[in-house]
Image (cartoon, coloured by chain):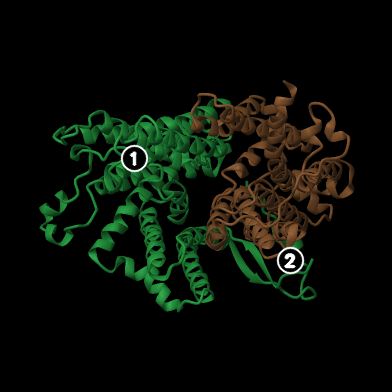
Amino acid sequence: MMRSPLRLVPRAAPSQSMLVLAPLLAVALTLLVGLIIFAALGHNPLVAFRVFFIDPVSDINGISELLLKASPLCLIALGLAIGFRANIWNIGAEGQMYLGGIFATGLAIWFHREDNAGGLWWLLPAMIVAGALGGAAWAGITAFLRAHLRTNEILVSLMLTYVADMLVKYLVYGPWQDPQSNNFPFTVSFNDDALFPVLAIWEGLGLDSLMEGTRLNLSILLTIIAVPLAWLFMNRSFLGFQLAVAGQAPAAARYAGFSEKKLVWVALLISGAAAGLAGATEVAGPMGQLNDRWTPGYGFTAIIVASLGRLHAFGIVLAALLMALLYLGGESAQIALQLPKAMSLVFQGMLLMFLLGCDVLVNYRVERRRPLHAAADPATTAPTAEAA
Amino acid sequence: MIESLNPLLASALAAAIPLMLAALGELVAERAGVLNLGLEGMMLVGALAAFVAVTHGGGLPGAVIAALLAGALFALIFGFVTLTLQANQVAAGLSLTILGTGLSAFLGRQYVGYRAPDSFAELPIPYLSELPLLGPSLFSMSALGYATLALLGIISWFLYRSRAGLILRCVGESPSVARSLGLPVMAVRYGAVAFGGAMAGLAGCYYAVAQFKMWQEGLTSGNGWIALALVVFATWRPARVGLGALLFGGVSALGLYLQAINVHVSVFALSSLPYLATIIVLVAISSDQNAIRRNAPASLGKPFHAGG
């Protein structure tokens, strides 16, 4: 095989600066390739760049939409990161989110009143709890099979996502369909007491005139509370420590007597609850009902958010904002440049792929290969690393 | 009674063929120690490539070649990131699926809503296709169907009876031993990944040009993931992939069959049958951890740095 002029030399310890630089490099590479794609499609790359990344957040409404999308992404990714740290790959957050939405919707429909005069103060909190429980229960199936029967959690959680999708469809085409929907697949619009209030926060801050007409709602508070909680859990709790050890050195975790079963349950229940919570905030927030196409794949995008955020609570906040911007950019490019919406998905895939590629710099140095005759073949002297 | 089962068997086999193709390709990659979760993405890219080729007058050979090439090239992105750049294979496979889903939806939008001008027709084998029970299904497949069964045999032979297959399995069991024997670990793994991609591409071609005869976003509807499960179910043995694919094909066909004869079960319950069956089968196979440990390639999913 042809020898490349560069070679990778393992570092003694992971490079801390590269841990931060690699995601930035990945973002830069994604932007670069994105501009090339725009140019190849016959658009002025700078105009396309502005439409995609600047226009969507150039007014207060745009910022509100950005936060509205970043919030569920962040919530789900925080949960996933806890599992990913332990090498427990829950990739079915999308399905767990559906179940959260279903559980919350169940309550909203049960207490629905035609005259919208319920005024039940406890309904929304109950829906939030129900959403978290629904997501956790759905993830619990995967947890049970993984912990007690050693069934692959990647495949099970993903298969359950397809089943959850069918469950949503069954409900909105069947028993939960709005009788006045002319056979369209959606439920009734929730009463006010089953919705997150939109303007309430801004009145307190004296910003209500500024935020008039935006859709950002109180559910963002849940995310704002979840971020430091997740950080504390991951970085300061014994359970979080056990999860990290189990991920980085499974043998050490076994030797220390950490229960693998318990960790699998903890990781999956937390990530399921977080995804379910996000589902509840969507149906009781911007959707205001359950329908058959209510999420743009937040559960899958959150996998990228968690990776890009380095499985770190604060990193995830930044990554969620960036990924929300990609969604908005996709919508804006669709309207302004007639570019297909799938462009966002292409950007997401590229970003994760570039990130994984750039991560090589964390554990390896790139060196120019010395000419073969100058020294002994470096291949025979360099240590052979076979990472577990 | 037997005649009424004919359509059921035929559609079971039709559903089994693409699963078999994709799972066999993945099996070869995994036998070389590389776990590629990007099947779904590679299948979609292959499906679009085949549909584009056939739409622009490439004919059926053009569709097959386009699907093979697109699948293999797309898989090489994964290969470069995991083999050369040492990335986590699980994450890279997921991102390949996301990229493939997005890319195929993005590039394929102007092909949505058209019918393939050319498609694989059934080629009944004289006399054999008139045999009772299996005749009308097994001996009236499309060329792609027969080719898949042939590939099943060829891959079995390759893995267990050829020197190259032995080398591939050695690389999958222990890349460091293989390397110390002077075997080209990297080249073998790159080759296996490209082969897996080509087979997934062909599976996509089957959906676009033989089964549905059209292109649509997310055409493969999760079958790439089912094919992945199939490899585990088959405990990494080709013949069992064949059997498993028929089983899964049977379950999907059963759903369609029950719909066709108006059984009063929700369409959505029937549509979730293949996914539930996958979970049940995975649970069944994981109850025998020894079988998995004995048969799984020892280095599966682990990065290998040759130091040179």
The residue positioned 37% from the left and 57% from the top of the image is: A324
Q: Read off the residue under disc 2.
A: A378
The answer to whether dots 1 and 2 both sit on one chain is yes
Closest to the observer, A154 or B4: B4
Which label belongs to residue A334?
A: none
Query: Amino acid type of disc 1?
Result: Asn
Q: Is there CB contact under 8 Å for labels 1 and 2? A: no
Closest to the observer, B186 or B204: B204
Chain B: colour as depicted: brown
Vertical relation: B95 (above or below) A57 = above
The x and y percentages for residue B273 are: 56, 30
Vertical relation: A212 (above or below) B32 = below
The residue positioned 65% from the left and 60% from the top of the image is: B49
- Confirm whether residue A351 shows in the render: yes
Q: Read off the residue under disc 1.
A: A182
Chain A: colour as depicted: green
